[in-house]
Amino acid sequence: MSVLFSQQLIFGLLGGLGMFLFGMKTMSEGLQKIAGDKMRKILSALTSNRLIGALVGIAVTAIIQSSSATTVMVVGFVNAGLLSLVQSIGVVLGANIGTTITAQLIAFKITKFALPAIGLGAGLKLFSRNKQYSYIGEIILGFGLLFFGLSTMKMAFDPLKASDDFRQLFLYVGDHKLLGVLIGALLTVVVQSSSATIGITLALASSGLISFEASVALILGENIGTTITANLAAIGTNLAAKRTAFSHFLFNALGVLYILILFPVFLKVVMAITPGNPDFIIQTQAQAQSFAGAIGDKPYIARHIANAHTLFNVINTLIFLPLIGLLAKLSTLTIRGEEDLETFQVKFIDDRVLNTPPVAIGQARRETKRMAQIVQEMVDETIQFLEDGDYKHIRNLEKKEDLVDILQKEVMAFLVKLSQKSISSDTSEAIGSLMNMVNDLERIGDHCENLWELGTRKIEEKINFSHLGETEMAVLSEKALEFLAFIIAAMDKVEKNIAEKSIEYEDAIDELEERLRMNHIARLNTGECAVQPGLVYIDMLHSFEKIGDHTFNVSEAIQGKK
């Protein structure tokens, strides 16, 4: 067994696995950058239709090349209330099929192109001035590293060909499928990547070290192990998110169970749809040249393993897609509890999707829009308080002010974390705009607080404005609220005339504030108004003018000018 602890094996396995995982990450990030807008459109297509949900799961996972990332993302969406439990199960079922594309890709005999791909990809990423070519370079570089890592792992396993103990171990695994499933599941949990487990399995199998039966057992275990990632991500989330993660484990575990019962039949189906004998071993130099391999290798087994992985997930999805409602009920019965009442916290952003920048920036936009709507409610209710003097408004306003402060801190922290990821220049610009937007919205909330404090002082000190003064204040406040409502409506869809109308609103509010201030000073000079009410009145005018200024800043951020 000393061969298991040889330097060649340990270094080769660690280095190869490291390159494989880094290659997967680099390729995934490049794909996300180049397909960010498309992915947002795909995600926006989610409906209650379970078939469409599954297709979305396939498409998103095919784009980002990680079922774990998709599932974790879905758990985040459910936690944010963007997806229902039934919708999420459909997406996760689709993600299981989407992730099999990785294995199909690896099964192609293109390892010899790994080094040229690394060279070409690095050249495009390092020296291209066009960002699209730079992203393509990332994809090609990741692709090359992935295959070079796989090749390195395969070479590291070569000394094991002479080890009878190692062969006996995996012959035992082939005879005891549950042990193979357990090993596959544990290995996936340890490396936190089903693609890495598949890579190791393919390297072992292609080197002739494990049988087709043992390989399929390991792949079945990987399908259970990959669900652990989502369940770990669900810790600390709401009940619906926990149930989504548990559903992922449930249908994969049940799928593995019935495939193990029908194991011989399943293997025959895979062999029937895949050319070649999976356990055929290259035995002569002529065969080695013909198959571009080495003596002892299994040239057909990689494609058989990839097809077994795909077939399992396709069958499982087709069986459970009509049973999504039942899965949801089983998850609800298993994960019991009552949902907590909504507290003052973020609703849409979730750190679990930070590794998927296009989705993360979309969540940040939704949270910012939510913050803007709360601020609009604050301005509206502040105006109501100034008109009717009812203190019940103050309690609501204080709660909203606290929530706006929390949202500012949380969104800013989320955007800072996102900015530290590998992101495109467009995403970087969007982050800057959102940061400015969030800060200006929080400042509008602060000016609302100033206004209701001035209103409280006006009531307590029995200060009265003239009828003309009250009328003028109402005109300015309504104009500020109207401007804010216009800008918030433009956050979803930038209107062509937003720049022009924003300038019109800003100028109108500034001119109105100056005119009203001068009118009030004139009334003070003629003795129509007392000094004390006059100071409160001018402070109120100033606060509404500042609300207009910060609203204008938000409009500039929406246009990408800030």
Image: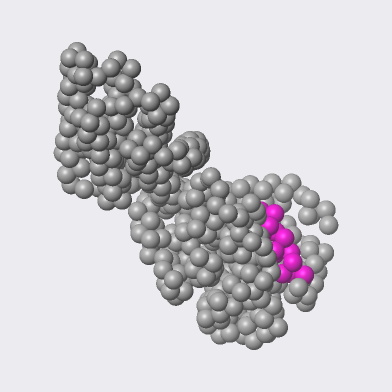
Which of the two residues, 519 or 294, is positioned nearer the viewer here? Answer: 519
Residue drawn 40% across the image and 32% down it: 452
Residue 444 relative to residue 477: left or right: right
Residue drawn 29% across the image and 30% down it: 544
Identify whether 331 is placed above or below 233.
Answer: below
Residue drawn 64% across the image and 59% down it: 231
Q: How is the image coloured?
A: one colour
Find residue 368 and report its horizontal and vertical position in percent. Answer: 40, 44
Residue 477 relative to residue 305: left or right: left
Find residue 355 and report its horizontal and vertical position in percent. Answer: 51, 48
Find residue 358 and report its horizontal and vertical position in percent. Answer: 41, 50
Which of the two residues, 43 or 355, is positioned nearer the viewer here? Answer: 43
Residue 125 shows in the view:
no
Quarter of the image for the C terminus: give it.
top left
Residue drawn 52% across the image and 59% down it: 78
Which of the two residues, 236 or 389, is positioned nearer the viewer here? Answer: 389
Q: Main secondary structure of the magenta part?
A: helix
Task: Please say whether residue 3 is one of the residues in the magenta stretch.
Answer: no
Res. 276 image quadrant = bottom right
